[in-house]
Image (cartoon, rainbow, N blue to C red):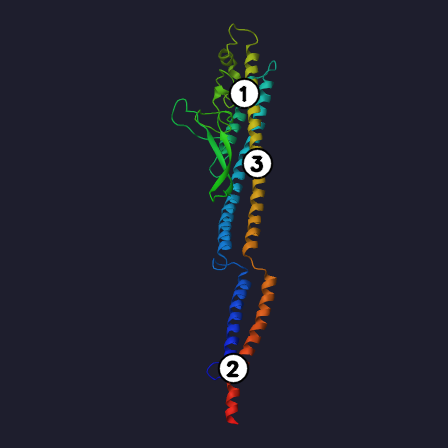
Amino acid sequence: MASILTNAAAMAALQTLRSIDRNMETTQARVSSGLRVETAADNAAYWSIATTMRSDNRALSTVQDALGLGAAKVDTAYAAMDKAIEVVQEIKAKLVAAYGVGADRSKIQEEINQLQDQLKSISESASFSGENWLQEDISDGAVPPTPVTVTKQVVASFIRNASGTVGVTTVDYPLNEDTVLFDTSGGNLGILDKLATSGATSLGFSVVTLDITDLDTVAAQLDIADPPGPHDDVDALDAMTQFVDGQLEAMTSAASSLGSIQSRIDMQEDFVATLIDTIDTGVGRLVDADMNEESTRLQALQTQQQLAIQSLSIANTNSQNILQLFQQ
């Protein structure tokens, strides 16, 4: 039936054109943004997952920066420890030189004094970003200071478990009686801090305070001068040398621990970088648009749109054809 009031063919063509236009808008948005899921309306589940993982990736990026800062602190401490070991080795060599018959111990002590000052300088200057792992002031005003444990931490990772709980893990390095070595004030707790009497029983000196020009005092402290004997000086030097050698072993152990932390931080940096890339890839699989597919679809929709417009134009000519019938 032909009607000038209702054009069913034009209505069908218009509906088809509207549908094609909506699909074109969606495809053009995907092509312009590169995203298949740009808003929650596109796919609520995928959008939620992608938004959460992007947030986690941003946190991991911050962890990367924190790892770099932590690595710098550990590198600074290790470099200082390496130099401190060299200095203490030299002090040990000077002690051995003091055994010699006719050795001028006052001159040797002058050299030791310079080495001790250098050791203090290394300990005090091994600071990065205001933090010094080799010399940590924890004095609480008590005499003697109350024993404490200071834990140095390096941010290592950001984690999210299955229940959605998040947290931050750290690489820890405790500073306590097992790690500290020598002390100049009795109020510090760092890798190069330790009470003078902890390295050798009843010795009243540390690496930075030993004095080979006062061997009688050392001998008396060790009760090796009662009764007095010709080997008192040698025994005192033996005690000093043994003490310094023990400190060297402790310093080597501490440097080894720092080296282990350096290695772990390097591995963690590589892992975090890989994890960030992997999460980015996973999010992309959820929300990124396939540009080859979308561009092909856009070309097809453009062709469909042209055909729909042509179909609508043909449908609209039906009324004109009816008018021609009345003109005959």
Image point (50%, 78%), residue name: 8
- Please name which of the two marks, 3 or 1, marks the residue nearer to the observer: 3
Image point (57%, 15%), residue name: 238
Q: Is residue 218 above or below residue 279?
A: above
In front here: 248 or 6?
A: 6
Q: Secondary structure under badge 1? A: helix
| Amino acid type at image mark 2 | Asn
Q: Badge 3: how crowded within 10 Å, few (<14), some, or many (20+)?
A: some
Precedes in sequence: disc 2 or disc 1: 1
Residue marked by disc 3: 262
In front here: 231 or 185?
A: 185
| Amino acid type at image mark 3 | Gln
- Residue 109, numbered circle: 1
Q: Residue furthest bottom?
A: 328
Task: Give the CA separation, mark 2 to mark 3.
Answer: 78 Å
Precedes in sequence: disc 3 or disc 1: 1
Q: Secondary structure under badge 2? A: helix
Precedes in sequence: disc 2 or disc 3: 3
Inspect this view and state whether residue 83 appears.
no
Q: Residue furthest front?
A: 1
Residue marked by disc 2: 316
Q: Is residue 39 above or below residue 259?
A: below
- Please name which of the two marks, 2 or 1, marks the residue nearer to the observer: 2
